[in-house]
Image (cartoon, rainbow, N blue to C red):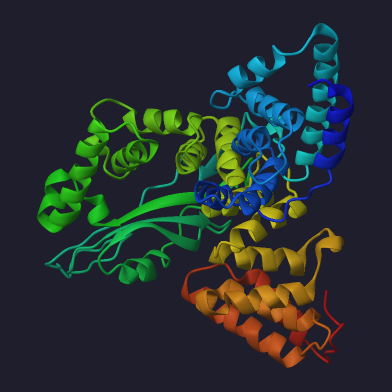
């Protein structure tokens, strides 16, 4: 490190201009393991741009060993130092060993320049990361006055008493198992359902589940959106019910437990934690699943980061910690975490709304095939308050991508209507037709479509031209 001052300045100059397009550290890890260092290096750079400690560490390794890039001890020191600031793995000891090789003058210069670099990196990352509204942390979301959402259980039953009325649920005769995650809109309706785990024929559950709105989420008296997990069919069973209805699933679950007790791999431990999340009766001590997920999150397991953060968020136990871990999972490029972070940036009462940041995370998730992220990205491009983000042609491309998966979603037709209204070759007739379709479909699934109906009334009142409304 003889020419440390010159080399470090050069390293600082060449590192910052990179701009992330999407994040996929899971793919980067695969490429790295397969010796595809050039592509891995580029993907790790994207992760470094949003402040991923894992990406910093891997870039430190690659610069140290000359993998996919010319060996450069100064750049290696930079990235190990950034990883050490987040206490990642053994980055602190690696950094300290490298610093120990420097004399006093060099060490002072390194400390100064590393401080400058870390500050510049921090400032760059603010383009992507959420900012918490501190004054809102003392308040919680309520649901028609209740502190928590009612957990909805959808049961399997082989015999039906026609006199029994089930306020929430679907009754079917063949057992199946389904856990879903969904958005809860301001009107309490179920939006953007994604399957977390399933066994058997589950479409019947989803078709019925979306018909039953939740209590309306509110924050300080104002409507907000929230997130929910629901357990359907055999997912509601106790141990003995699961053995009777789905013995194979029970056997697989017990196998996961046995494996985890003999293994210390992060993946085996994560499977064990999630088994306890799905089946609380498996816990041998209170909060065992939550404790294990937190431990795995700290050790760098991206899915555990998301599950732990989401659990904290849904329970409103520690909002800053919840947002931190959902963000950390997003930095890995975990699509469901990226989608959730995008939604939080648009709707969470504890995070400053930022359409540009949300669009980045939605687009990163859609690159990995996340269907709801594609639709939400299109919405921003059509309706953004920040007019610099509006891009009707780009939104049209996204809607085309979403058509196959979202053709039963009322929101898809609403956005399609807006796109026909605003696109260069606007088509008023198709705008009206698709808006009417959105309203009909929304009413069937108990959505509040009053805003759409008001728009339709403005568009079809009296003598209409394309610019007569809004």
Q: Quadrant of residue 220?
A: top right
Q: Quadrant of residue 63?
A: top right
Any part of residue 9 in sight:
yes
Query: Looking at the picture, how far across and down is residue 130, in whole percent?
Result: 70, 41
**Drawn side of residue 322 relative to residue 207, left or right:** right
Identify the residue at horizontal 23%, vertical 32% (top origin): 262
Identify the residue at horizontal 81%, vertical 90% (top origin): 462
Residue sitting nearer the eye, 88 or 310: 88
Query: Looking at the picture, how far across and down is residue 58, in whole percent?
Result: 61, 37
Residue sitting nearer the eye, 425 or 107: 107
Query: Looking at the picture, how far across and down is residue 16, in whole percent?
Result: 82, 41
Which quarter of the rendering shows the C terminus?
A: bottom right
Which quarter of the rendering shows the N terminus?
A: top right
Instruction: Establish if 18 lies above or below 117.
Output: below
Residue sitting nearer the eye, 447 or 195: 195
Instruction: Establish if 196 lies above or below 285.
Output: below
Instruction: Check the image and name the residue furthest to the front.
Output: 2
Identify the residue at horizontal 15%, vertical 49% (top origin): 251
Give the number of callouts. 0
Identify the residue at horizontal 24%, vertical 43% (top origin): 256
Instruction: Check the image and name the residue furthest to the top.
Output: 104
Query: Looking at the picture, how far across and down is residue 239, in whole percent?
Result: 16, 44
Any part of residue 281 in sight:
no
Q: Quadrant of residue 391?
A: bottom right
């Amino acid at each position: 490190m003889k020419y440390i001052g010159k080399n470090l300045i050069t390293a600082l100059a060449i590192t910052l201009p990179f701009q992330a397009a999407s994040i996929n550290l899971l793919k980067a890890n695969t490429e790295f393991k397969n010796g595809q260092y050039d592509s891995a290096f580029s993907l790790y750079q994207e992760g470094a741009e949003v402040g991923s400690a894992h990406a910093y560490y891997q870039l430190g390794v690659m610069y140290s060993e000359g993998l996919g890039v010319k060996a450069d001890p100064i750049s290696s020191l930079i990235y190990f130092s950034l990883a050490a600031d987040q206490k990642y793995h053994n980055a602190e000891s690696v950094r300290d060993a490298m610093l120990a090789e420097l004399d006093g003058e060099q060490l002072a210069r390194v400390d100064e320049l590393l401080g400058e670099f870390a500050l510049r990196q921090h400032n760059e990352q603010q383009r992507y990361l959420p900012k918490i509204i501190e004054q809102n942390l003392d308040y919680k979301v309520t649901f028609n006055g209740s502190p928590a959402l009612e957990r909805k259980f959808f049961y399997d039953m082989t015999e039906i008493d026609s006199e029994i009325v089930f306020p929430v649920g679907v009754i079917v005769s063949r057992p199946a198992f389904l856990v879903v995650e969904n958005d809860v809109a301001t009107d309490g309706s179920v939006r953007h359902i994604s399957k977390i785990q399933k066994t058997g024929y589950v479409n019947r559950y989803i078709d019925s589940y979306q018909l039953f709105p939740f209590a309306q989420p509110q924050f300080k008296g104002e409507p907000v959106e929230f997130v929910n997990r629901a357990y359907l069919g055999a997912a509601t069973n106790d141990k003995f019910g699961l053995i009777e209805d789905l013995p194979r699933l029970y056997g697989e679950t017990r196998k996961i437990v046995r494996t985890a007790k003999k293994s210390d791999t992060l993946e085996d431990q994560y499977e064990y934690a999630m088994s306890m999340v799905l089946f609380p009766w498996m816990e041998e001590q209170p909060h065992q699943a939550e404790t294990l997920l937190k431990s795995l999150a700290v050790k760098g397991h991206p899915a555990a980061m998301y599950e732990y953060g989401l659990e904290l968020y849904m329970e409103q136990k520690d909002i800053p910690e919840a947002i931190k871990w959902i963000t950390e999972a997003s930095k890995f490029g975990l699509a469901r975490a990226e989608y959730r972070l995008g939604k939080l940036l648009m709707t969470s009462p504890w995070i400053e709304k930022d359409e540009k940041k949300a669009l980045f995370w939605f687009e990163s998730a859609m690159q990995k095939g996340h269907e709801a992220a594609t639709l939400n990205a299109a919405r921003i491009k059509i309706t953004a308050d920040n007019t610099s983000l509006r891009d009707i042609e780009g939104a049209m491309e996204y809607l085309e991508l979403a058509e196959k998966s979202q053709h039963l979603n009322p929101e898809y037709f609403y956005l399609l209507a807006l796109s026909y209204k605003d696109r260069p070759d606007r088509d008023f007739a198709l705008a009206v037709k698709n808006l009417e379709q959105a309203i009909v479909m929304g009413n069937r699934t108990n959505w509040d479509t009053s805003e759409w109906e008001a728009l339709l009334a403005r568009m079809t009142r009296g003598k209409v031209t394309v610019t007569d409304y809004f």
